[in-house]
Amino acid sequence: MANVVVVGAQWGDEGKGKVVDIYTEHADDIVRYQGGNNAGHTLVVGSEKIVLHLIPSGILHEGKRCIIGNGVVLDPEVFIREITKLKESGRIKDDSCLMLSESLHVIMPYHKRIDIAREAKSGDKKIGTTGRGIGPCYEDKIGRRGIRLMDLLNEEVFARKLKEFLVEKNFLLENLLGEGPCSYEAILAEYRGYAEVLAKYVTDTALVLGKDLKAGKKVLFEGAQGTLLDVDHGTYPYVTSSSTCAGGACTGSGVSPRDIHEIIGISKAYVTRVGSGPFPTELLDATGEQLRQTGGEFGATTGRPRRCGWFDAMVIRYSVRVNGLTGIALTKLDVLSDFDTIKVCTGYTFKGKALETLPAALEVFENCQPVYEELPGWRTDITGAKSFEELPETARSYVRRLEELAGCPIAMVSVGPRRDQTIILRNPFA
C-alpha cells in the first residue's frame, strides 16, 4: 500500500496535471486538497488538449474516484461548466466517480468583485491575483464568516447567512472600493439553482477517505500552485491564500499524516512564475523569451505569459525540506534542447554574503544575486526517448546534476507533453 502526495516544487505551473494523470493509473482515489479555479492543469491525451481547473485530472481515467476536499474553495458556476464539458466529451459516465466535501467553502459573487476591485486599486503593488475571488473566500473562511457547501444545500441557512454577510460586503464595495452593491435576490436565486445541481456530489469526503484508507486503497493527493506560493512558506505577500505544501494534503482532506507514504515534488527543468514577486533567476532577454515560446509558457487559467528563468537549486532544496520530498518529477526537459549551454543557479548571495536558504524577508529576496554554473547542452531532439539511457549523455548529466543539487532523487523525467513522453525512474506507488 502507498499513498502519494504530489506538490509543485517551484512557483506553480510545473506540469502537475500530467504527472497526476500518469500516477492515477496506480491509485484508487484522487484527491484535490487546496486552491480553487485559479489553477489550471493542462493535459494532452492522444491529440486532445484538456484543461481542468477544479476537477482532479484523474477524472480522465475510468473506474477512479475523484474527490474535491474541504481545503478547496469552489466556484459553483465553474465546477458545473467543467462537469458539463467533460460529460459532453464522454469523460464522465457515472456521477458517483466525483465527490465534493460538504465542508468546502463556496466562492460568492462578492468575493470576485472584491478581488478585482482591490487589485485595480493596488497600482504597482499588485499581487497578480487571477481575480477569481479565491483570496477573499479564504479570508472569510479564516474569519469564520464563510458559506460552506452544506450551508448552500440548506435553503434556510443559506438565505440567512447570505443576508447577514451581504451587509458587510456591500458596505466594503460601496464605501471603500467605489463599486455598486451586490443584489441579495439575484445571488439567492442563482445559487439555489447551483445547489440543485451540486447536491448529488456532496458528502462527508473525509469519512469516505478514512474508510478507503482502512480498506487498503491507494490514494493520490493532488495540490495546486507551488511551494513558493504557499501562504505560510512562500514569497509572502506574493503568494496564494492556501497551504500548497504537502502538509496541506492532510488539513485539506481530513486524513492523518501517518497515511502519507510518498511526497513527489514537480519541477520544471527551468523555472517559471506568473504574477508579481521575487524571481532571482528570471531572464528578461531573448533567452527568457525563447524558453517562453518553446515551452508554451502561458497560463492555463488566464493566458498570461509566464516569467521564465534558469533552474534554481535554492528553490528546490527549500521545497525538499519543507515538503519532505521523497522524489522529484522533472518536467519539460525537452524545452532545453535548443541551447548550447544551460545555466543552473546553485545558490544566492546578498551584499556579497552567501545565503544558506531562501530569505524570508521580501526585501532581501528581491535583491539576491544568483550564483550560476554552466553546463553543456545537447542540441538534440529528445522527445522520442523511452528510457533514461536513450537521452544524450549531456542531458543525463544535466539531470544528475540537478538531482545532486536538490539532494533528492529524481523519480520521473518528462520529455514532451504526451503521456507516452515520460521516463519513469521510480514509481512511488510500487
Image: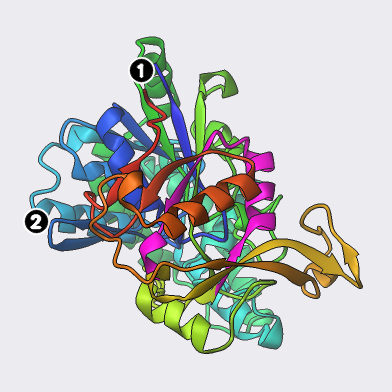
Viewport quadrant of the N terminus? top left
| Amino acid found under the numbered disc labelled 1 | Asp
Q: Residue at x 32, y 29 (%)?
A: 29
Q: Residue at x 41, y 72 (%)?
A: 299
Depicted 382 relative to depicted 230: above or below: below
Depicted 330 relative to depicted 247: above or below: below
Viewed as shown, does residue 278 lie left or right of 269? right
Instruction: Find numbered disc 1 in the image and state the secondary structure of the residue it sits on.
Output: helix
Numbered mark located on residue 397 in the image? none
Separation (CA) of disc 2 from disc 1: 30 Å
For marks 2 and 1, the one nearer the N-term is 2
Residue labelled with disc 1: 212
Q: Which residue is drawn at 29% across and 29% down?
A: 26
Give the extent of the magenta segment.
Answer: 309-335
| Amino acid found under the numbered disc labelled 2 | Glu
Q: In the rendered image, which quarter is residue 337 located in?
A: bottom left
Q: In the rendered image, is residue 123 in sight? A: yes
Viewed as shown, does residue 48 lie left or right of 113? left
